[in-house]
């Protein structure tokens, strides 16, 4: 069931990125829950709960108000939830009106795979690096099961034990590890040299989630961060370094190298864990194509 289902999910994901209005609701995917790990690309309210609400105009168009997303519309993780027939994911850190019975979102804007040596107040990177997100997940799992064992009333807002091995585990993280190298004044060559360590830390977390029962892994590669306005504004390039679309070529080269090594990492994980399913999703190509044809597409989903 898993491989057919995942192929369909890819198709729906790509079409939801390209065609902004998607109302996929009927699908053969039968994941009872989703656990997501990541950064602002998939934060549905974590950073807003931990620090400060996301301000307008984020959220105006689709939700009618700021909705904890660093984006005006829905994020890819929202489309994935809708595609498998589940409600939007609540942020694990959100203490108001949350319902985790169909999963939880550990992503926070500004998260990195590696722990940063600076604080949120210095550089804006989230203190909830991927390892911290995996500890939150471990605690979430053990406390959920305890709630069921004790039969407490709030157990209905938590997933039962069997969901943890049936759930879809989604990851979209790494972009901030690469930009943080530039923030600490590394050269492009130096940033490239950090990639193996970043991916080792990523592998550690996948192993830990596997150890806690995860079997269906859905891993996004990183986007063309050389097209992000804040990157181009902060790190001015020489004209020959800007490509025909207006994106910073050296930055995108780093993203592509990261992705090639991530793809290799995922291949190694498949070998190490034959009982699990790993899907590597080429978000880079979809986003770059949207940005390249921005006029035709009307709106782009950078977020
Ligand atoms: C929580 O979500 C589940 C699954 O969507 C739903 O069945 C349940 O009614 C919700 N519980 C509350 C208290 O909203
Ligand atoms: C933080 O500092 C430690 C110790 O110097 C180093 O090993 C690690 O790579 C640094 N992390 C980052 C993200 O730069
Ligand atoms: C990077 O360089 C800028 C400009 O020279 C400087 O202001 C900043 O403090 C440096 N950052 C780090 C982390 O060394
Ligand atoms: C990932 O690697 C596989 C080989 O393991 C290759 O067939 C595939 O094209 C690669 N995917 C991307 C998007 O580069």
Image (spheres, helix red, strand yellow):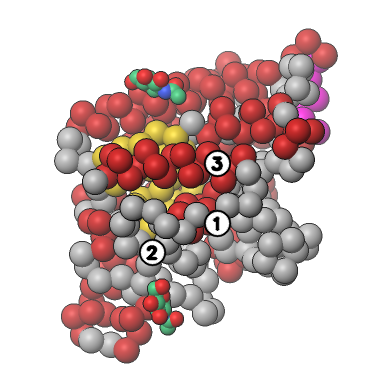
Q: Within 8 Å of ligand 1, the CB of disc 1?
A: no
- Lower sequence index among marks 2 and 1: 1
Query: How far from the left and from the top, in percent, is residue 89?
Result: 48, 64
Check whether the beta carbons of the residues at disc 3 and disc 1 lie within 8 A of each other.
no
Mark 3 vs mark 1, CA separation in Å: 11 Å
The residue labelled by disc 1 is 23
The answer to whether residue 125 is visible is no
Tell me where residue 96 sits by quadrant: bottom right
Query: How far from the left and from the top, in percent, is residue 56?
Result: 78, 63
Say whether residue 237 is magenta. Answer: yes
Query: How far from the left and from the top, in percent, is residue 189?
Result: 58, 16
- Left/right placement of residue 232 relative to residue 206 reads right
Tell me where residue 224 sits by quadrant: top right
Instruction: Judge the density around disc 2: few (<14), some (14-19), many (≥20) Cα neighbours within 10 Å.
Output: many
Outermost residue, front direction?
26
Q: Say above or below: 106 vs 242.
A: below
Q: Secondary structure at mark 1?
A: loop
Please report the bounds of the magenta region as a residue range. Answer: 232-238
The residue labelled by disc 3 is 15
């Amino acid at each position: 069931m898993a491989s057919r289902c995942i192929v369909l999910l890819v198709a729906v994901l790509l079409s939801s990125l390209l065609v902004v209005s998607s109302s996929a609701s009927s699908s053969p995917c039968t994941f009872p829950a989703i656990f997501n790990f990541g950064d602002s690309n998939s934060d549905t309210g974590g950073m807003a709960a931990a620090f400060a609400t996301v301000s307008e105009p984020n959220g105006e168009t689709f939700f009618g108000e700021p909705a904890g997303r660093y984006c005006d519309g829905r994020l890819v993780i929202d489309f994935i939830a809708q595609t498998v027939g589940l409600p939007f994911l609540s942020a694990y850190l959100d203490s108001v009106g949350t319902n985790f019975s169909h999963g939880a979102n550990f992503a926070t804007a500004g998260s990195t795979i590696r722990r940063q040596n600076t604080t949120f107040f210095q550089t804006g990177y989230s203190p909830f690096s991927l390892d911290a997100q995996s500890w939150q997940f471990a605690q979430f799992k053990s406390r959920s099961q305890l709630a069921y064992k004790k039969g407490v009333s709030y157990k209905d807002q938590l997933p039962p034990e069997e969901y943890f091995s049936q759930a879809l585990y989604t990851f979209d993280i790494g972009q901030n590890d690469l930009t943080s190298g530039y923030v600490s004044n590394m050269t492009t060559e130096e940033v490239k040299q950090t990639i193996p360590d970043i991916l080792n830390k990523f592998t550690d977390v996948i192993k830990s989630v596997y150890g806690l029962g995860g079997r269906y892994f859905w891993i996004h590669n990183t986007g063309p961060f050389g097209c992000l306005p804040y990157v181009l504004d902060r790190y001015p390039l020489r004209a020959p370094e800007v490509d025909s679309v207006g994106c910073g070529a050296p930055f995108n080269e780093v993203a592509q190298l990261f992705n090639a090594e991530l793809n290799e990492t995922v291949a190694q994980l498949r070998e190490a864990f034959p009982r699990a399913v790993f899907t590597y999703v080429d978000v880079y190509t979809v986003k770059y194509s949207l940005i390249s044809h921005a006029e035709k597409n009307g709106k782009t989903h950078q977020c």
